[in-house]
Amino acid sequence: MCGIVGYIGREHPAVEVLIDGLRRLEYRGYDSAGVALVGDAGIDVRRAQGKLSALEASLRDEPISGHVGIGHTRWATHGKPSERNAHPQRAGSVAIVHNGIIENYRELREECEANGREILSDTDTELIAHLIDEAIIGGMDLLQATRAACSRLTGSYALGAVAESDPNHIVAAKNGGSPMILGVASGQAFLASDIPAILPYTREMIFLEDGSFAVLGEEGVQIVDAEGRPVDCEPKTVQWDPVSAEKGGYDRFMQKEIFEQPRAITDTIGTRIDLGSAEVDLDGCVFSREQVEKMSGVTLVACGTAYYACMVGRYMIEQIAGIPCEVDLASEFRYRRPIIGDGALVVPVSQSGETADTLAALREGREQGARIFAISNSRDSTIARESDDVLYTHAGPEIGVASTKCFTTQIVALYLLAMKLAVVRGRLSEEETRSHLDHLIRLPRLAERVLNLDGHIAKVASRYFHSRDFLFLGRGIMYPIALEGALKLKEISYIHAEGYAAGEMKHGPIALIDEHMPVVVIATRDALYEKLISNLEQVRARDGQVIAIASEGDEEIAAKANDVIAIPDLGPYLTSVLAALPLQLLAYHIATQKGTDVDQPRNLAKSVTVE
Ligand code: AGP
């Protein structure tokens, strides 16, 4: 999760505020960092791969001074972490820092190259700097140039820019992507992607809205809309103590992590996909056509929530890549003497990268000669180190014991793997690949739309939090989502909850249904919709209370359910991620209304490093 800091003022040396702010964002994870200061002598950019200490060493060797600057910490997702891909990215007389995904970066890159601009990095960010620099050369000031550049962008961005032509201001812009926070104090102005970065300096903050721009100067902060019209924004006083600062202003880490998912998904996608060329880059991990053709199958192994992500991933790998895919609980796989075919790929999935059973399953696969391709959220974890390849989710640290953002980013990582295998196999046309990738790029913004249902979901939760049992039903790719929904509820509210394949209802569970049994039915408009509706009617016929996760615009279902939570449709694969979000919020609100310890539920550990 990348971090942004900016400062203008003479109360403190700018570089000290930048480094101090970036250090407060370290917990988000990064592998390169940089700062840019602008003054009468021009722009001075310093970047270093690795930890902040490497950047600080460079600054000690060659100090830079000034009262206007921007800084950034970055987790490389495209190719290896490197200095040239670190931010701030510079083009001509402009330097910028950026969080988000520019979806049309390929065409912008071609345009910049056609205009004779020399592209020095692999990043989409650099192209924004070129667009701003071109506009300034054309006579615009920094704000006008930034607005003009952003009008060319498709995708999400939160960015800060400085320019030699205007050394006394920083311009910020935001559209989706991570937050962009402006801090104000007399004679000073601050920029940050997260409140903790600037909280020691000011509590007066403005939260930039999507589509807005800000000009930061010693005289204060001016906000304008996309058309350049001034927008009145009174700063809010942030009353955070240090602990709540870590929780990002949320009541609990789990709540914060649920709402971080659009950003975590954005960061996990990173620049691993290229719409223009319809390519997928798994951080340089190579699968040759011959390897994939010879691949007898893919085996996904994990525990708990990660296992349910694998169950979702199986649909993607089999249906998109056309490769047989097996999913197994690591604690079973490690003991059942599995038969692993030649050329097989074993994929341990683990947010902590330390789960004992999953590590043992990895070693079983290794012993049988399989290639090990891990998916993990923890850099350099044991599972990561013992794998041939690792695809990191970029969810940032997950503090809440109940996994949320790691679950959805694991599904994204499995989708990327399925896409990569399909592309290498030549199984998809460019158009089909582009269509799949376009769904992925739309996911973060649709996830935000679902999370905006939080108030409604809290109300639904208040009607059922006293229940003693829950049933969660789903079919197809939504079956593992039902299992995950049940796990979320049971592990944080201590209510007994079971996930079931809806087709199994008549084989037993239906005996449980009565007026005391809430049943969550995932009945989105997919190929199995009609079957879910009949399941739903079976439950209602026995006085069961139905909470339906439905598709937006489905008017019929309201008459068949006690409560409806409507989500957007994002095709046969990624709608599963959108369906998981209301189940996370439902579990969260039921547990908080019950008063259990949501972040540290009884008997549970965040990482099960023992059998
Ligand atoms: C999920 O909410 C639980 N905390 C638990 O099931 C967890 O997913 C499981 O222990 C696997 O952890 P890992 O992803 O770190 O391997």
Image (cartoon, rainbow, N blue to C red):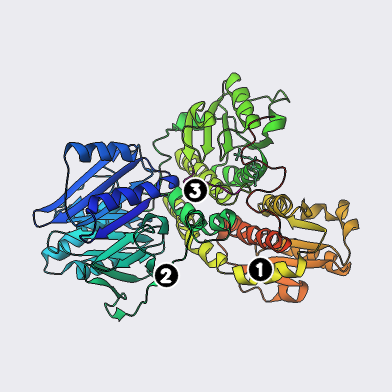
Q: Amino acid at mark 2?
A: Thr
Secondary structure of residue under mark 3: loop
Please state, as top left, top right, bottom left or bottom right, where the C terminus lies in the image. Answer: top right
Which residue is at 31% across, 50% downward? 72
Q: Which residues are magenta?
A: 393-400
Residue 111 visible in the displayed image:
no
User: Mark 1 vs ligand 1: CB under 8 Å?
Assistant: no
Q: Is residue 48 above or below residue 274?
A: above
Q: Measure the C-alpha gap from mark 2 to mark 3.
A: 28 Å
Q: Earlier in the sequence, mark 3 or mark 1?
A: 3
Indicate which label's residue lies in the foreground, 3 or 1: 1
Q: Measure the C-alpha gap from mark 1 to mark 2.
A: 27 Å
Secondary structure of residue under mark 2: strand
Q: Amino acid at mark 1?
A: Ala
Q: Which mark is residue 395?
A: 3
Q: Total label count?
A: 3
Residue 534 visible in the displayed image:
yes
Residue under pointer 2: 237
Quadrant of the rendered image containing residue 177: bottom left
Q: Residue furthest left?
A: 41
Q: Is residue 90 above or below residue 351?
A: below
Position of residue 545 in the picture relative to residue 276 (left or right): right
User: Mark 3 vs ligand 1: CB under 8 Å?
Assistant: no
Residue under pointer 1: 458
Q: Front-most of 556 and 14?
A: 14
Quadrant of the rendered image containing residue 451: bottom right
Which residue is at 59% across, 29% downward? 296
Q: Residue furthest right?
A: 511
Quadrant of the rendered image containing residue 580: bottom right
Position of residue 193 in the picture relative to residue 296 (left or right): left
Secondary structure of residue under mark 1: helix
Q: Measure the C-alpha gap from mark 3 to mark 1.
A: 25 Å
